[in-house]
Image: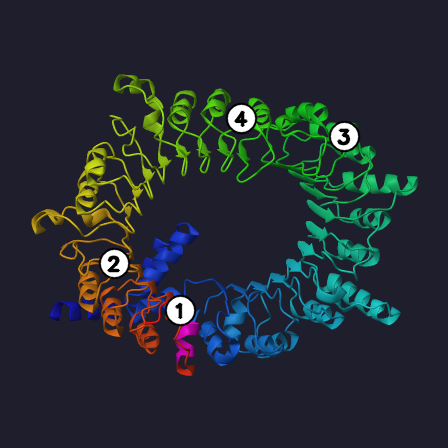
């Protein structure tokens, strides 16, 4: 006790600025790792919680419970907790009233708002102009906002556009796409004029704009686009799909004033271009020497445009011509031959395209990452260099069709033929000859496939690492002799095997002397018992995860055989088995087993006492004990020897009361998720106590009789998601 007290004092006297320096050195990692480090450190002490909060720069608010139970005053305290936020996303916030967003915005501390560079207000009914105006008025320094996203706002008024222009002079990215109700625009001429004036003011005052998204706006026209290109000298990307008042002539005039554009998106230019307009439009597009992304979806284009772009050798990496018409193979062929940097191509609904045309085009697409040719009815899949076929659950096709497709797919790496009922050994064996490059295959539900298909895959697919044959006839049919197994060296490369519902009383492949298997799934293999699994464990030294749920004849002997033979094993799932029945090693032996196990799933254990609670060392992070007959004492013992638990599932543990849950939460100092759905002996006030005593909690699944109290609102808003479970039991 004295030692712990001294440690706590040492932490408290260490200056916060020193902690900031130390923590900053730990955060040069991936985003997910960064979050993990911050959350872990925040649990150590109040001082570290305060320090780590200063390293949170982005925040997205999820309003996960009714706003009537969660006052805005409580939500707004978030901004005091994270003083250095630079990015705030309120796109999923749902207030009870339309004006709630204004009130929430107005409560952001001026210092915090002055640090914001990105604000997302999408999907809200209004632009919270009064809330923003209030906070700007109280802020001595001007806003640093460089990105404002207001997509899908219920009603965007011209006064909102004027407010944005006047209030955020440093904006570089602006998104006011798809306003509801046509952006509030009617056919009244004075309203049209008001919107035009507001947009002209926007382009004059926001001269630093680099990216604008006006998609789906009825009030954008040629004049406003021209003013944008004239006034915004740094403009690089313009998105204007579904803007009906934009024309070829308007685009041509505007683009000539801004040749530095590198991304241009415009759609539905349906009117045929007259000769003078045609020349101007083509010249304007080809003047964009830095153009990398071009989207002209559902527009009337021609070969002259495509050939002119090719002659200028524009550095295109993305080209979208979805639904475009009036162009031919000659135009697209010329363009692709001069676009060596192209990575993304969309030619949907190009009706002229067939195999004869596409195959030579593929010679120009060496750097292609994605292609979309949906709706090209004259095109067969065999013309494409596909690496993945997914035909799960498809019907009305036969062996002849799949055979033709696979014979023309030399680059194929991933194949999914689940539920192909016609497929049997006789059909699959010849198909294997086309699958030399295959890495993974899923033929689950093909009930007529047996041993012959499995060994044919092994002998023909040297790169195969993932085989899934659930609900098949695997185990039926001839198997090679032990001596012959040596001809399958690729067995060493198999990492994933999934063979659930095997009806046979013996696994044909357990004699493999060499196996690099990492993941094994034998769910519902009813024949499997300790006698069969124990010798198999000797060949699974590299196993990382195993699932034998539903194998009711497996008990303690199998469990400990896995632990002793598989040193890398980290995930064991033995739901609905006989785990707990049979001998267990002595205490002295147990200490060597569970150090590396991170996930255990043992639900439906009929025994009232878990056989492994005497383990002295345990690094478990995820434990599922649902539907088990454990009581408060068992749960207390488990939580004491598993203090590192992150997730604990106690669903339907009907003998557990609030006392057991409280002790588990106290003992598991890192606990993030707990499920005590259908634990009807747990009282309703347990949730608030848990959140208060264990600040690491992020998710609680409570019994259906739990009701949120007003005094719990603050705790829930600041820390934890609470879900109400559904339960069929009556007591």
Residue 443 % position (x, y): 46, 34
- In this figure, which residue is indicated by the disc labeled 4? 411
Q: Earlier in the sequence, mark 2 or mark 1?
A: 2
**2 or 4: mark nearer the eye:** 4
- Dot 4 or dot 3, earlier in sequence: 3
Magenta part of the chain: 712-724
Q: Which residue is mark 2?
A: 644
Mark on residue 437?
none
What residue does disc 1 label? 720
Magenta includes 723? yes
Q: Residue at x 52, y 28 (%)?
A: 412
Q: Are marks 1 and 3 in contact (CB under 8 Å)?
A: no
Q: Which residue is most to the right?
A: 275
At label 4, counting other C-alpha atoms closer than 10 Å, the crowd grade (few under 14, some 14-19, many 20 or more) is some
Residue 512: % across, % down: 27, 26
Task: Indicate which disc, 1 or 4, sits on the residue closer to the N terminus.
Answer: 4
**Mark 3 surroundings within 10 Å by alpha-carbon count, few (fewer than 14), some (14 through 19), many (20 or more):** few
Foreground residue, 414 or 695?
A: 414
For the C terminus, the image quarter is bottom left
Q: CA distance from mark 1 to mark 4?
A: 47 Å
Left or right, 554 with reference to 358: left
Q: Determine which residue is flagged by label 3.
A: 311
Quadrant in the picture for residue 623: bottom left
Element type where label 4 sits in the image: loop
CB within 8 Å, label 2 to label 4 = no
The mark closer to the camera, 4 or 3, is 4
């Amino acid at each position: 006790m004295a030692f712990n007290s001294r440690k706590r004092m040492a932490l408290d006297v260490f200056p916060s600025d020193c902690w900031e320096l130390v923590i900053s050195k730990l955060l040069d990692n991936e985003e997910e790792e960064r979050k993990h480090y911050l959350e872990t450190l925040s649990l150590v002490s109040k001082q570290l919680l305060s320090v780590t909060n200063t390293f949170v720069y982005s925040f997205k608010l999820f309003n996960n419970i009714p706003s009537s139970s969660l006052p805005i005053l409580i939500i707004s305290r978030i901004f005091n907790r994270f003083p250095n936020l630079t990015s705030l996303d309120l796109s999923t916030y749902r207030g009870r009233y339309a004006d709630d967003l204004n009130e929430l915005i107005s409560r952001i501390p001026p210092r915090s708002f002055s640090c914001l560079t990105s604000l997302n207000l999408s999907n809200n009914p209004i632009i919270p102009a009064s809330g923003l105006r209030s906070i700007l008025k109280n802020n001595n320094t001007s806003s640093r906002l460089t990105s404002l996203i207001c997509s899908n706002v219920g009603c965007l008024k011209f006064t909102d556009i004027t407010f944005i222009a006047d209030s955020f002079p440093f904006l570089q990215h602006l998104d006011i796409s798809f306003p509801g109700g046509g952006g509030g625009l009617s056919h009244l001429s004075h309203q049209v004029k008001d919107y035009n004036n507001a947009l002209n003011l926007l382009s004059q005052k926001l001269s630093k704009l680099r990216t604008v998204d006006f998609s789906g706006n009825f009030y954008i026209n040629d004049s406003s686009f021209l003013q944008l290109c004239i006034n915004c000298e740094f403009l690089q990307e313009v998105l204007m799909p579904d803007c009906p008042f934009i024309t070829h002539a308007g685009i041509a005039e505007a683009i000539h004033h801004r040749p530095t554009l590198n991304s241009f998106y415009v759609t539905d230019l349906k009117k045929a271009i007259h000769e003078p307009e045609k020349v101007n439009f083509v010249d304007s597009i080809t003047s964009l020497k830095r153009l990398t992304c071009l989207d002209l979806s559902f527009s009337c284009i021609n070969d002259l445009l495509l050939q002119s772009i090719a002659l200028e050798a524009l550095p295109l990496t993305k080209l979208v011509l979805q639904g475009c018409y009036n162009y031919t193979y000659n135009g697209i062929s010329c363009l692709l031959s001069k676009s060596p940097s192209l990575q993304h191509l969309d030619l949907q609904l190009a009706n002229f395209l067939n195999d004869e045309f596409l195959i030579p085009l593929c010679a120009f697409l060496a750097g292609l990452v994605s292609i979309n040719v949906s709706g090209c009815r004259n095109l067969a899949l065999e013309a494409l260099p596909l690496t993945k076929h997914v035909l799960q659950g498809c019907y009305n096709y036969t062996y002849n069709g799949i055979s033709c497709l696979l014979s023309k797919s030399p680059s194929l790496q991933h194949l999914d033929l689940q539920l192909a009922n016609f497929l049997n050994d006789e059909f699959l064996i010849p198909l294997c000859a086309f699958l030399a490059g295959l890495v993974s295959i899923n033929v689950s539900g093909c009930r007529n496939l047996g041993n012959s298909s499995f060994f044919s895959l092994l002998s023909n697919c040297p790169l195969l690492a993932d085989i899934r044959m659930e609900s098949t006839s695997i185990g039926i049919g001839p198997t090679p002799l032990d001596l012959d197994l040596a001809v399958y060296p690729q067995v060493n490369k198999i990492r994933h095997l999934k063979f659930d519902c095997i009806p046979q009383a013996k696994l044909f492949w357990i004699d493999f002397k060499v196996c690099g298997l990492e993941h094994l799934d034998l769910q519902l293999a009813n024949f499997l018992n300790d006698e069969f699994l124990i010798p198999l464990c000797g060949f699974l030294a590299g196993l990382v995860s195993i699932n034998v749920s539903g194998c009711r004849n497996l008990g303690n002997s199998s469990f400990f055989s896995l632990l002793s033979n598989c040193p890398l094993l980290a995930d064991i799932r033995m739901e609905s088995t006989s785990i707990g029945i049979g001998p267990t090693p002595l205490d002295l032996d147990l200490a060597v087993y569970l150090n590396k196990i991170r996930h255990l799933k043992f639900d439906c254990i009929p025994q009232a006492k878990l056989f492994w609670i005497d383990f002295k060392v345990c690094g478990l992070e995820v434990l599922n004990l649902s539907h088990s007959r454990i009581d408060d004492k068992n749960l207390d013992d488990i939580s004491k020897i598993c203090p590192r638990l992150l997730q604990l599932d106690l669903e339907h543990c009907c003998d557990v009361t609030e006392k057991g849950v409280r002790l588990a939460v106290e003992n598991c100092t890192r606990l993030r998720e707990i499920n005590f759905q259908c634990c009807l002996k747990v009282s309703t006030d347990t949730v608030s106590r848990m959140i208060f005593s264990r600040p690491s909690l992020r998710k609680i699944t409570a019994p259906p009789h739990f009701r949120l109290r007003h005094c719990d609102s603050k705790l829930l808003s600041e820390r934890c998601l609470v879900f109400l479970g559904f339960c069929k039991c009556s007591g």
